Amino acid sequence: MADASIYTVGGTVQVNEQGIYIPRQADIELLKLCRESTFAYVLTPRQMGKSSLMIRTAERLTDEEIQAVIIDLTQIGTQVSADEWYSDFLDLVASQLMLSTDVKVWWQANSQSGLTHRFIRFFQEMVLAEISDPLVIFVDEIDTTLSLDFTDDFYAAIRYLYVARATDPELRKISFVLIGVATPADLISDSKRTPFNIGQRIDLTDFTIEEAQPLAYGLNLEDKQARAILEGVLEWTEGHPYLTQRVCADIARDLQDEERPTDWTETDTARVVRRNFFGVKSEQDNNLQFVRDMLIRQSPNRYKSEVLNTYSKICYGRRNVRDEAQSIVKSHLKLSGIVKKNGKLLKVRNKIYQTVFSRKWIYEHLSADWLKKIKTTAFLGAVIFVILLIPFSIYADHQRRLAEEQRRQAIEQRTMVEEQRKIAEEQRKIAEEQRKIAEEQRQVIEDLFLGQLAKTAKEDLDPRVKAFLDTIAWSLRTQSLPSNYDIVLDGSEFEDFSDHPRKRTCVDSYFGLEEICGYSAGRYHIIPETWDWVADQLNLNDFSPASQDLAAIELLREKGSLDQIETGNFKSAVYNASSYWVTLPDSDGESYYADDGYQARSIDNLQFMYDLFYARYLLLAKE
């Protein structure tokens, strides 16, 4: 019968008496460095097996008569003074080494020395005096120190104990291994101090299929079938230690059910994954909670949007994203665990993460972050609004006066020949259209900086794409509507976003046509046939604002406009997209559907509005 007890889901493997420890390359590398008294650090995401590796290595060192001390910093906590913190740390060291020194008494007796100096002196004067064998001090959960205001000194002291080996060879007996969810740059945050640049990094990788093979034993199946199931699990987890053991444990429990069929398929594995990680469960699983918090709550303050934008590029970008060790954003993404190195590039860690933190999820949280920026820039936006509105109001008033003058001239010329009457009427229409455009543009300026339009942000990280989508909506006269995602062709609203409304409506005038009926709907006037195609391409399950934006972006991508937008070639992007939107001109300046009577917006007016929208996004990005 299958045995789920061999799988360790959370915590260290050593706590589970029946648990299976999976050795990896990191075991060999860390043990070697500890034997050589080399400072090392294991800084990786949560639930990758750091603590299990630490305990395993400490046990093997003890067998080789190398003393090992394990300090879990959560024992000390964070609600203590710097004096108490250092004293408690040394007390934990002394108790495990069974030193004869009373740490508390010694600490108080030497209070004339600063905290860092006292800490260093304790190792030089007290620890070295009482040990004969090499000593490795494992410091676990170092990320708990990042919120403290004195730990720069702590890590500087550890660095000193390493550097001082050059003048005090006895210090070669002592080495440290730092373990936690952090980067070396986090350890000493003061830019004026020398960074934490000692020691060797140990990379804790995901299980390979060969390394994970012992996990198949818990399934209690014939070897070939068990390996096939394990391979199916790794298709979802890519060997992530926690996710892999969690899925295997649940499969083992299912296999214990004697009433279930004996054949296990990939569909069964997918069902287990969905049951554990998708839907409501994605909010409850502590590993997914950690990743989520790292992406939206614990990301570096000035880089919150860039974290999601970069992750979006890694997932869905047309170009590969290179790893950069000095990049704060990419280092944070790697530390969250959602991406990992793949040679010189970055890739999403596994299929479970990519499914939970999907394109739609990225979009929704970019939108929320974007709205916060809108609020924080309200005052600046108002100032910009006034500055932009004044000349624009003058322009609009001039356009109105011009329209009135042309209309008056047209009236005076009614007695002229029929051809002249037609020309005058045409001039009046052009002038009226110019007046409407000016009024629309003025209204957009108001809406842009008074916050009416900013209901959602677009999925793509590039502000050029966001501005282009706004320009399409403006060309369709949906940009200035208070709720521009819930309208159909005639301007009426719909309430059900579960699917495209597929509602036929008619209008008396529509971009050159005196009367037209159709089924277009939403912010981008998408027709049902187009929607069905793009929804299938993106696996969109509703007609929500988020889905409409994603659909529009996909249409731009399909026509090659997205590349043109991202490289700043606005006109080419418009021309390419003209076959989807009747209001966008082709390279001849006409609607792609001109033969049917449609009229496109002028490329100059579109460029003008695009520049306004783009300027707004650049302004927000600087906040």
Image: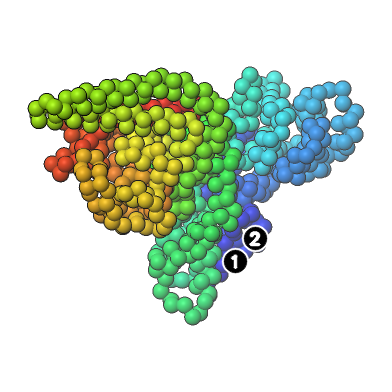
- Tell me the quarter of the picture where residue 572 sits: top left
Relative to 464, 1 lies left or right:
right
Q: Nearer the viewer, residue 82 or 139?
A: 82
Note whether 211 is above or below 514 in the view shown.
below
Relative to 91, 587 lies left or right:
left
- Tell me the quarter of the picture where residue 36 sits: top right
Q: Nearer the viewer, residue 442 or 431?
A: 431
Residue 586: x, y in percent? Answer: 19, 34
Residue holding disc 1: 5
Label 2 residue SS = loop
Q: Amino acid at mark 1?
A: Ser
Which one is earlier in the sequence, the residue at label 2 or at label 1? 1
Q: How many marks?
A: 2
Q: Residue at x 46, y 71 (%)?
A: 221
Note whether 358 is above or below 35 in the view shown.
below
Q: Are marks 2 and 1 in contact (CB under 8 Å)?
A: yes
Residue holding disc 2: 16
The 10 Å Cα crowd at callout 1, few under 14, some 14 to 19, many 20 or more, is some
Relative to 234, 538 lies left or right:
left
Q: Residue at x 61, y 24 (%)?
A: 195
Does any portion of residue 177 appear in the rendered image? no
Note whether 591 is above or below 251 in the view shown.
above
Q: Residue at x 71, y 23 (%)?
A: 168
Q: Nearer the viewer, residue 368 or 589?
A: 589
Q: Amino acid at mark 2?
A: Asn
- Tell me the quarter of the picture where residue 13 sits: bottom right
Residue 143: x, y in percent? Answer: 65, 39
Note whether 380 is above or below 348 in the view shown.
above
Residue 83: x, y in percent? Answer: 82, 31
Label 1 residue SS = helix
The 10 Å Cα crowd at callout 2, few under 14, some 14 to 19, many 20 or more, is some
